[in-house]
Image (cartoon, helix red, strand yellow):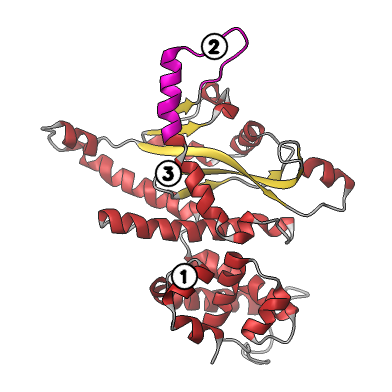
Amino acid sequence: MNFYNKLARRPKLFLSVTGMHLHTFETLMPQFEQAFLKLQSQRKGKTIRTGADRQRAAGAGRAFNNDLANRTLMLLVYYRLYLTQEFMTFLFKAANKSVICRNIQQMRPVVEAVLPTPERARRRIFSLAKAESERRQKRIGSIDEFRQAYPELTFILDGVEQPKRKPKDKLKRKSDYSGKKKRHTRKQLITATPNGIIVDQSPSVGGRTHDFHAFKNDHAQGGVFKEFADVRASLYADSGFQGMAEMGLPLEVRLIERARRNHPLSREQKKINQLRSSKRVKIEHTISRRKKYRVAGEAYRNRDEDYDQTMNIVGGLVNLRAYERVFQRTGVRL
């Protein structure tokens, strides 16, 4: 009996070791198969070394020891528990850790193509906001109808650092060293909704980079906030993003006020900070859910070049659970 068949008998354990409900995995399995066949046909259409058209028909060669369900499970277990690949050879009866590594590399684009990654979640939220805006021509007769007809999208921005191994390159050791964490880290800026849906994760940078500096660089290179021009939105962030309001972003920026020398905060400013902090703290809950996938919470052991794609998949897994919570609370499927 293979590993998937054993886990399928215990749904609670399946959720614990994969971060995904068993019924959700079974529902998405046909989509994983379609994405895998599509990517395989693209990969096998060209030769690897020269890139020329393939002469022989695809289909020859040795078959996989594990079926697609077990290979998908291999990636989910690796991201959720972050086990060593040597140990995973016992779970999936692989010859050596290179088999585990190759399967994870092959399944990354497959899983990424199916999950509600931050980009897909952002498009879905914008489409729902557009549908709501079309209702504005309806006659409004009460305050509740006004709030439904003129919704305001709320987003929260914060930075997250993850420890990593000490780089061998001297220049990279300097750029990745975080003075705040006192070790080498990778940093990303995360934008999420109050109900825990991640709508954007910036390209990762070294831990030496300040959050606001990373934000300005991302915005200068065509960041996602330029897409907010067609919606009514507000953005909450901590006091480390001072100066964001002067950047001309197409949304209302609400930052935590910072006291300065000889300029303490007034009672009104403290009250505003308290209200904004109660909104902004929800991004910490989302980051906590992200770190439950240990590939995003423990010291990162893989290549820096794979970090953004790995975190994009983790963001899709977090959004998948957030979609389920929204459906249980409101009955709306996102």
How packed is label 2: few (under 14 Cα within 10 Å), some, or many (20 or more)?
Answer: few
Q: Position of residue 20 (x, y in %)?
A: 46, 68
Q: Quadrant of the N terminus?
A: bottom right
* Mark in front: 1 vs 3: 1
User: Which span is picked out in magenta?
Assistant: 257-278
Which residue corresponds to the image point at 62% horizontal and 34% vertical from the top-left?
Answer: 220
First in residue order: circle 1 vs circle 2: 1
Proximity of marks 1 and 3: CB atoms separated by less than 8 Å:
no
Q: Is residue 149 visible?
A: yes
Circle 3: residue type: Thr
How packed is label 3: few (under 14 Cα within 10 Å), some, or many (20 or more)?
Answer: many
Circle 2: residue type: Pro
Q: Position of residue 119 (x, y in %)?
A: 49, 52
Residue under label 3? 193
Residue under label 2? 264
Q: Nearer the viewer, residue 200 or 82?
A: 82
Instruction: Count numbered badges in the picture.
Output: 3
Residue under label 1? 15
Q: Nearer the viewer, residue 316 or 246?
A: 316
Q: Is residue 47 visible?
A: no
Q: Is residue 264 magenta?
A: yes
Identify the mark at residue 133; answer none if there is no mark: none
